[in-house]
Image (tube, rainbow, N blue to C red):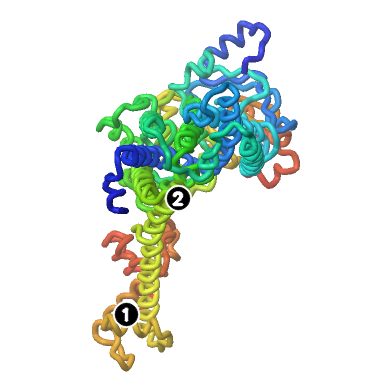
Amino acid sequence: MKLVTPETPQTDREALAASPLAIRGLTVSYAEKPAVFSVDATFQPGKMTAIVGPNGAGKSTMLKAALGIVTPLSGRVTAWGNPLDTMRARIAYVPQRASVDWDFPTRVLDVVLMGQYRQLGLLGRVKTRHIQTAINCLERVGMDGFADRQIGQLSGGQQQRVFLARALAQDADLYLLDEPFAGVDAATETAIISVLKSLREQGRTVVAVHHDLSTVADYFDWVFVINTSKVAEGPVAEAFTQANLQEAYGGRLATAQIGVTG
Amino acid sequence: MIWDALTLQLGYNATLVTVGAALLGMAAGATGSFLFLGKRALVSDAISHATLPGVALAFVAMVALGGDGRALPGLLAGSALSAAAGLLCVSALTNRTRLSEDAAIGAVLSVFFGFGIVLLTVIQSMSSGRQAGLESFLLGSTAGMLWQDAMVIAIGGAVVLALVALLRRPMTMVAFDREFAAGAGMNVPRIELAMMGLALAITVVGLKIVGLILIVALLIIPAVAARFWTDRVGHVVILAGLVGGVAGYCGTALSATAPALPTGPIIVLVSFALFALSLVAAPNRGVLAAVLRHRRFQARVHVRQGLLALAQGQPIYEGLTLRLMRRRGLIRPDGVATDQGQAQAAAALRDERRWQALRSDPAHEEAAASYDGLTPLDDILTPDQLTALDEGLRPKEVP
């Protein structure tokens, strides 16, 4: 991310300063095949944005590279106009739930407490107020009463809710979620979307990798369409169009698409 | 003799070594917990085997400089350097080639160990003298251990233990969810490096007592044993420290009772005994508990099936079902239902009918998902919900 970039034009600098997460020229490559190629993205403050695209289009990879979880080949990422690393405390990330071992010996409460790592530090004692915050976050995702459960006993939907609760415990201004609705039951989907909408009402920004085209218009107000490189970005009404999706999904569109505007 | 050894009555040096080994075992168990939980257990095997060339080269270097080739600090420094080189090779092979980590570990482990053995053989044929005893680094030995050696081990163990306590939180987060930890701004590679560094320190400090071939057992077995007893990271780490400490203490004491007993294998056998005990006897995750749980579950299934058969007037053929129902006083020895049996059979049938109604009603989709043929519906629905279900059942029963 230390690539030398030409002087940023004034208008773009204003856009960068306003955006909770702005990506410029991001390329990520596994071996010698770019998974994400030269992507620019400017996520809008206080909006809910869906990142959509076919399988293998680089949706998750773009998010991980923006956060520095995988190392990009080139590109620059800013948060509210500043280098991302200086803004970590205001950003919460919810990984795919399949990325961890759910037989890990820990309780639901301990996972949520991980979200307060910054407050706790290396040796800080877990105090009543930390536990209270964690329990409040569990309540918000409808998991009160599960605090003492071993995480291995949770269903897939409950695991996803615990991950969301951990992110809520970070009390961030920008929430980045990787496939939060993948493989969860209908009740969990409803619970998660209502939490995300409440975050937006508080003026926070939500960006989610999303695979279900039929719910994009209901859940989100902005959309970012990607297939290795950027296809479109904008309000759902303008960017979530038949033409853009056709470009991103190609022949796979017929099976992927139900209920797209325009 | 064994009692004397366990109660630390074999003299000052033996006592110091035993206490040192206990500290080392505690540190090894606690450190190993994080390797085990982060699924990096095998890396420690590569680290330990990679120490051998360092030991041999340090010996040669010290002899060449005119010193005593067997000075422990020098040998440990050499082993640490070559173990670090081995670790770098594993991570370079994993990150920069398409080799998976286990393949890289296998390659590095065998090449370093083979090189070390060749060097040892060459040293044996040198005429520098005093080279005897280097091979004790393979399997560990307390024979001829000096006071300073024991202090190095005890202090090393204590320092590692303190560092584990300091880094427990980030190491737990990285072991559970690397991506979240990285997203939260933690320096994941540096934390993993620290974890490996601690394993390396344990290996180097434990070389003299446990030996490089078996140190991996002292890192991993205590954690695996501890995992049987608890579902919480903190408890796994503490229990693993205890298991490791007991193994180090008892193993060293036992091996001090006879001059030719290698220390490493005995420590490993003690920790294996604790592992075997955990495997069999631990509640929940232990084998015994699993067998009992299975038996109880099987009995529930058989009784439920038997009750449903009774209620519907079907014959019961299965021996186990009949035995279980007789023992519970649900049927008489000749197979006829008792009053209690009839009552329970009717209740089971009513429960099953309610379940059928519930599962055909889309409004109860979520509750219907918990159907397993065994759970009584009373556990899941509130009384008013049950009454509503029964309302729906009535017309069907009176056609």
Q: Nearer the viewer, mark 1 or mark 2?
A: 2
Q: Amino acid at mark 1?
A: Ala
Residue in the foreground of this view, choosing between B206 and A1: B206
Crowding at mark 2 (Cα within 10 Å: few <14, some 14-19, many 20+)? few
Q: Which mark is residue B302?
A: none
Q: Is residue B232 visible?
A: no
Residue B398 % position (x, y): 35, 80
Residue at image coords 35%, 70%: B296
Residue B127 % position (x, y): 62, 33
Q: Secondary structure at mark 1?
A: helix
The quadrant the C terminus of chain B occupies is: bottom left
Which residue occupies the extreme bottom position in the image? B334
Residue B230 % position (x, y): 35, 49
Identify the subunit bearing mark 1.
B
Residue in the foreground of this view, choosing between B69 and B186: B69
Residue at image coords 75%, 31%: A32
Task: Decide: is B379 above or below B334.
Answer: above
Q: Secondary structure at mark 2?
A: loop
Left or right of B143, for residue A127? left
- Counting every numbered tag in the picture gives 2
Task: Decide: is B22 above or below B228.
Answer: above
Q: Amino acid at mark 2?
A: Ala
The residue to which callout 1 is attached is: B345
The residue to which callout 2 is attached is: B260
